[in-house]
């Protein structure tokens, strides 16, 4: 049997919600929510016209190149007012865990009730023009309440969290910690506390107490540490390794490549990643960047580990590789900023 109907476009979101409620009444459960692919997690301080202008060079967006979707966690509402001729849209002022406020639009959402406590949002970013001045236009696409119990930690085990991120004397704090617990494990990469035995991600071992000395480059890296160590206590000092620009990263990566080409060792992106406290994905993209920039021919580097002279001019696909590397570098900077400023319980 087939049936047809028509309704105004602005009523489609409400129709979908009512249909989901009817499904629940008829079948006793709700259909699983579709998975949302997030391109990057950002603190609000990164939502600038410069950042949007940068990634908009990836346009045009469409079916084969979907618009980028960003996310921010532990958001609370500052103000919420309906807008539009029929008052069915909303303009919200939200604040993130660092206390940075930002304005968001949310179409056809006037009947949706937001949580009273912190929640997570996914949103798209664009630029609007007002009186010949570009402004950030952030549009909410999805929201959800954060899971209170961390996914990677067993619900039956309570982890004691100690926040030393704002310590004025982290080395003195670390000395005191080691004095009272000689079995604790210190995770550190690239920038190390002098005089202490530390472990990178590939050598980390189980322990009751884990000290996070270096700010992790990604949530996956942090989860890996927690899974490998399985600690009862986590002490977060979180020192930025100091690789703050794309130029810094590329110079360090090139240094690793030159050293490897003179040795008899093999290329492993995970080893490179822990040496300079990055993700394996940006190591691989950085290798592509150096190749397509034209200074070196790295087309066979992953197998012969040799730095060969390149054409000394960019290859045709260099612009796309450059855009990809910039976005990945923004992701790592954003996560590190979030890790250093967010509420300590929200980063788990």
Image (cartoon, grey):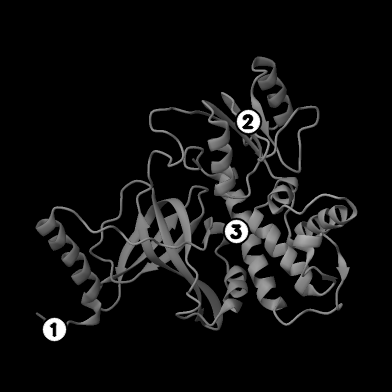
Query: Between marks 2 and 1, how big is the CA–CA gap?
Result: 61 Å
Q: Nearer the viewer, mark 3 or mark 1?
A: 1
Q: Secondary structure at mark 1?
A: loop
Q: Secondary structure at mark 2?
A: loop
- Residue labelled with disc 3: 331
Please name whichever residue, 28 or 109, is drawn nearer the observer in this view of the structure.
Answer: 28
- Residue labelled with disc 2: 205
Rendering coords of residue 296 (x, y %): 84, 70
- Residue labelled with disc 1: 4
Query: Between marks 3 and 1, how big is the CA–CA gap?
Result: 45 Å
Extreme residue in the top direction: 180
Q: Quadrant of residue 286?
A: bottom right
Query: Is residue 86 in view?
Result: no
Q: Earlier in the sequence, mark 3 or mark 1?
A: 1
Q: Earlier in the sequence, mark 2 or mark 3?
A: 2
Rendered residue at 68%/25% (across/down): 173
Rendered residue at 62%/73% (across/down): 54
Marks 2 & 1, CB-CB < 8 Å contact = no
Q: Earlier in the sequence, mark 2 or mark 1?
A: 1
Q: In the figure, 221 relative to 69: above or below?
A: above
Rendering coords of residue 18 (x, y %): 16, 65
Rendering coords of residue 185 (x, y %): 65, 27
């Amino acid at each position: 049997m087939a049936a047809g109907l028509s309704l105004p476009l602005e009523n489609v979101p409400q129709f979908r919600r009512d249909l989901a409620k009817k499904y629940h009444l008829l079948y006793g459960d709700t259909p699983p929510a579709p998975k949302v692919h997030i391109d990057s997690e950002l603190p609000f301080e990164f939502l600038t016209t410069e950042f949007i202008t940068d990634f908009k060079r990836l346009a045009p967006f469409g079916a084969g190149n979907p618009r980028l979707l960003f996310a921010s966690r532990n958001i609370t509402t500052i103000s919420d007012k309906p807008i539009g001729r029929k008052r069915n849209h909303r303009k919200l002022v939200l604040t993130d865990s660092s206390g940075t406020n930002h304005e968001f639009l949310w179409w056809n959402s006037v009947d949706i009730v937001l949580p009273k406590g912190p929640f997570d949002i996914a949103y798209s970013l664009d630029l609007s023009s007002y009186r010949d001045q570009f402004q950030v236009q952030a549009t909410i696409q999805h929201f959800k309440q954060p899971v209170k119990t961390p996914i990677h930690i067993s619900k039956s085990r309570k982890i004691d969290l100690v926040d030393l991120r704002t310590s004025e004397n982290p080395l003195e704090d670390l000395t005191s910690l080691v004095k009272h617990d000689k079995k604790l494990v210190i995770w550190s990469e690239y920038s190390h506390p002098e005089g202490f035995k530390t472990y990178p991600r590939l050598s980390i071992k189980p322990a009751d107490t884990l000290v996070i000395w270096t700010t992790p480059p990604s949530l996956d890296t942090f989860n890996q540490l927690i899974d490998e160590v399985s600690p009862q206590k986590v002490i977060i000092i979180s020192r930025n390794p100091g690789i703050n620009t794309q130029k810094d990263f590329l110079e360090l990566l090139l240094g690793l490549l030159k050293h490897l080409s003179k040795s008899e060792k093999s290329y492993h992106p995970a080893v490179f990643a822990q040496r300079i406290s990055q993700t394996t994905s940006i190591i691989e993209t950085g290798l592509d960047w150096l190749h397509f920039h034209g200074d070196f021919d790295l087309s066979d580097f992953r197998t012969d580990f040799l730095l060969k002279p390149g054409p000394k001019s960019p290859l045709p696909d260099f612009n796309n590789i450059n855009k990809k590397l910039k976005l990945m570098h923004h992701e790592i900077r954003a996560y590190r900023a979030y890790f250093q400023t967010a509420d300590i319980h929200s980063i788990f």
